[in-house]
Amino acid sequence: MNPDTTDAILFQELFSTWESKLLLYTKSLVDDTESARDIVQESFLKLAKALRQREHPPAGDADGEGGEHRRRWTAWLFTVARNGALDHLRKRKPLIREEALMSLPSVGPTPRRALERAELVDRVLQCQKRLTRSQREAIRLRFQDELSYKEIAQVMNISVTNVGFLLHVGLKRLRELLKEELQAVPFGNDGGNL
């Protein structure tokens, strides 16, 4: 198969699989949808350039190990997006925008449940802010973007052991912070019939 065709197929696979998750990830870092879109677009432009500039194996050789090859490019793509987001953050003052999370749809049908959910989201956000930036980022990459420890290590430029430590300590701290908050939130019937 022609290397240009192989690159185009790989690019399309990576774009269709990861574009929306990269957007969520970068938005969680920069807290601005438009900036996140710009960062993701720039990341895919860099991917296209990197694919064009890489050296191809001789004809007949396998280009990578299939899934492992795509995972390496996925980690590369997340790393580029992360670096772009960090560069963006260095250039601006942080803005606090929580309206996106506050506008999540209610689990229950009543206005009271919607208010309880909004209060719970606010409590979770407040507790999450008390984690370190690295802990928040590792938790997002693992649970929001479903990356493996190895991929997170590549994206954050740390060891796999450190990823496990960040996740363990971050989740433990978050559980402690939320324990009282979750116990205080009534999740039962609000007194009305559904």
Image (cartoon, helix red, strand yellow):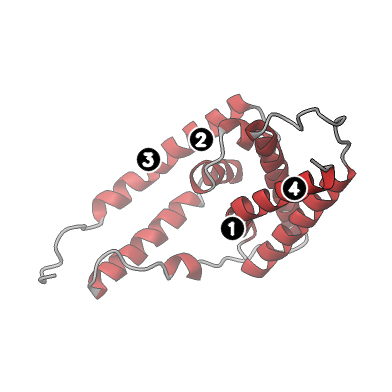
In the image, what residue occupies the spot 76% across and 33% down?
Answer: 63
Q: Position of residue 45 (x, y in %)?
A: 79, 57
Could you tell me which secondary element the residue under label 4 belongs to? helix
Mark toward the start of the polypeptide (2 vs 1): 1
Mark toward the start of the polypeptide (3 vs 2): 2
Mark 3 and mark 2 in contact? Answer it, CB < 8 Å. no
Mark 4 belongs to which amino acid? Val
Q: Is residue 186 above or below residue 141?
A: below
Q: Nearer the viewer, residue 155 or 44?
A: 44
Tell me the distance, in whole angstroms, between the alpha carbons under discs 2 and 1.
23 Å
Tell me the distance, in whole angstroms, between the alpha carbons under discs 3 and 2.
14 Å
Mark 3 belongs to which amino acid? Glu
Q: Which mark, residue 187?
A: none
Tell me the distance, in whole angstroms, between the alpha carbons under discs 1 and 4.
15 Å
Query: Label 3 belongs to which residue?
Result: 176
In the image, what residue occupies the spot 29% across and 50% down?
Answer: 182
Q: Nearer the viewer, residue 166 or 184?
A: 166
Please tell me how crowded label 4 is: few (under 14), some (14-19), or many (20+) other residues with Cα within 10 Å: many
Mark 1 belongs to which amino acid? Ser
Query: Label 1 belongs to which residue?
Result: 20
State which quadrant residue 72 falls in: top right
* Image quarter hosting the N terminus: top right
Query: Label 4 belongs to which residue?
Result: 80
Q: Position of residue 19 (x, y in %)?
A: 63, 56
Mark toward the start of the polypeptide (1 vs 3): 1
| Between marks 1 and 4 in the image, the one whose residue lies nearer the viewer | 1
Query: Label 2 belongs to which residue?
Result: 167
Could you tell me which secondary element the residue under label 3 belongs to? helix
